[in-house]
Image (tube, helix red, strand yellow):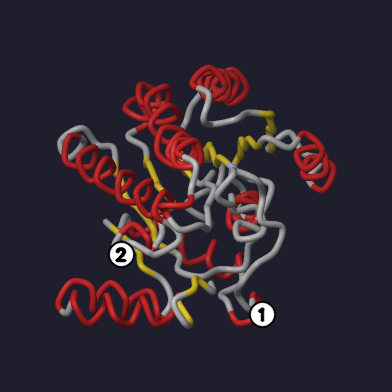
Amino acid sequence: MSVWKDKVILITGGTDGIGRALVEECLALGARVATCGRNADKLYQLQQSFPTAALLTQVADVSKENDCRLFIQRSLESFGRIDVLINNAGISMRALFQETSLDVIRQVMDINFFGSVYCTRYAMDALLESKGLVVGVSSIAGYRGLPGRSGYSASKFALQGWLEALRTEMLDKGVHVMWVCPGFTTSNIRQVALNREGQQQGETPMDESKMMPADVCARHILRAMEKKKRTLVLTFNGKRTVFLNKFFAGWADRLVHRFFFQDGKLIK
């Protein structure tokens, strides 16, 4: 029997990519799942795909504190408890810093960092009661700043620092805190990444077919949750980047610059 059977798992950003895969995997394992997203049509399609009382969907923009509060409140009203909160909702950006509107940096921080803070704060009493689990879906960009993604990197560094502090606060309270860094995974995050004016890019610079499938990533995350790992870094390139940046930072600077630039222009 799955350890997640009948557990109440909240997943933000559950309509696409890793979030959608996590919703599907958790339901298949017998969990009761609440998820939120900004797109009402996608949430409706998700609910139609899984017409079960074990799935609750709600429109919410995690950059708005009140939306987060209402999502947590409705989840508690529907299921009565919270065993796991997976802070997955996120957005990226692609533009050189000197060309980027400051509103873009602010929007990325509001979603990727403050969205996790808001949801976790409003869920904390329930998580303390259940001695539950808080998960943050971060990125290799939380270990290594990436050119053209300065705001995204900043948000993930902030997320990981905050989660590490929270983990330490919770050590004697029974709530486990962990963060996962998937590396490049099939998702629409690159298509909807913000450009320098804050508009969606509409395309991906990467070969999505060569990336880890979202369902495989979701299963890795769930296994790490079951084992209550501290952190999870996925893919060979992800592990290599973290290692090189820790022990050979100057070399990592040059390698990352070579990967993202060609003839002095940002290409990825």
Against 188, is 205 above or below? below
Count of picture labels? 2
Please report the residue visible at 23 percent of the width from the left and 79 percent of the height from the top.
Answer: 244
Q: Quadrant of residue 149?
A: bottom left
Three-letter amino acid code of the residue under disc 1: Ser
User: Which of disc 2 and disc 1 is earlier in sequence?
Assistant: 2
The span from disc 1 to disc 2 (Cα, nearest Å) is: 24 Å
Q: Is residue 83 visible?
A: no
- Whether the residues at callouts 1 and 2 have beta carbons within 8 Å, the answer is no
Please report the residue visible at 68 percent of the width from the left and 29 percent of the height from the top.
Answer: 58
Please report the residue visible at 65 percent of the width from the left and 67 percent of the height from the top.
Answer: 204
Circle 2 — which element?
loop
Please report the residue visible at 18 percent of the width from the left and 77 percent of the height from the top.
Answer: 250
Q: Quadrant of residue 255?
A: bottom left
Specify the label residue 209 is tagged with: 1
Where's residue 195, x and y in %?
59, 52
Three-letter amino acid code of the residue under disc 2: Arg
Q: Is residue 99 left or right of residue 20?
A: left
Q: Which class describes the residues within 10 Å of circle 2: few (<14), some (14-19), or many (20+)?
A: many
Against 11, is 117 above or below? above
Circle 1 — which element?
helix
Closer-to-camera residue (44/264): 264
Specify the label residue 187 is tagged with: none
**Mark 2 highlights which residue?**
144
Where's residue 99, x and y in %?
48, 52
Where's residue 174, x and y in %?
24, 36
Against 209, is 111 above or below? above
